[in-house]
Amino acid sequence: MSSDKMWSPEESDSQISKLVRKTHESPFVPIGMAGFLAVVAYGLYKLKSRGDQKMSVHLIHMRVGAQGFVVGAMTFGVIYSMYKEYVKPKFSHPSDK
């Protein structure tokens, strides 16, 4: 079987290689995802020992903590990318290029 389409390496990329490439482009996204999973895992672990706290209050606290971690990671990612794009080039020496 012959095909008229040209082969491109992008078509054969696996999901893992795409994830690795995206991680190098924006490293704070996987950090946010890992923090989210850590907060949720900790919340589920502490579910047994919540005492007399209502289940809904415990879940709301868990959601706010996980959401805060993700928003914080995204904020640091935006600040870092702005630093790389706007601040760092101003202070680089001509010999660095």
Image (spheres, rainbow, N blue to C red):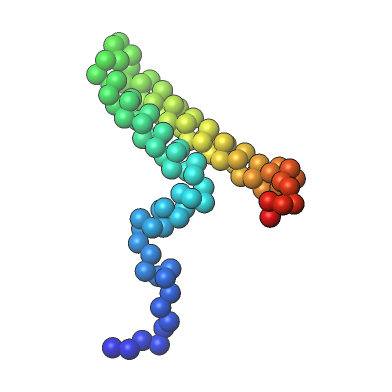
From the viewer's perspective, is 8 left or right of 45?
A: right
| Residue furthest top in the image | 52
Residue 10 visible, this angle: yes
Residue drawn at x 37%, y 69% as measured from the top left: 12
Q: Where is residue 42 in the image (x, y as percent from the top left)?
A: 33, 25
Q: Position of residue 24 (x, y in %)?
A: 48, 50
- The answer to which image quadrant residue 32 occupies is top left
Residue 41 in the image: state x and y as whole percent: 31, 30
Given residues 94 and 25, the one toward you in this image is 94
Q: Which residue lies furthest to the left in this view?
A: 48
Residue at the spot 36% in from the left edge and 58% down from the top edge: 15
Q: Residue at x 30, y 15 (%)?
A: 50
Q: Front-most of 67 and 79?
A: 79
Q: In this view, does 16 lie to the left or right of 87?
A: left
Q: Where is residue 47 in the image (x, y as percent from the top left)?
A: 28, 21
Asked whether residue 86 appears in the rendered view, the answer is no
**Residue located at (38% from left, 64% from top):** 13
Splitting the image into 4 quarters, where does residue 97 fall? bottom right
Residue nearer the viewer, 31 or 69:
31
Q: What count of labels does the image hold? A: 0
Q: In which quarter of the image is the N terminus?
A: bottom left
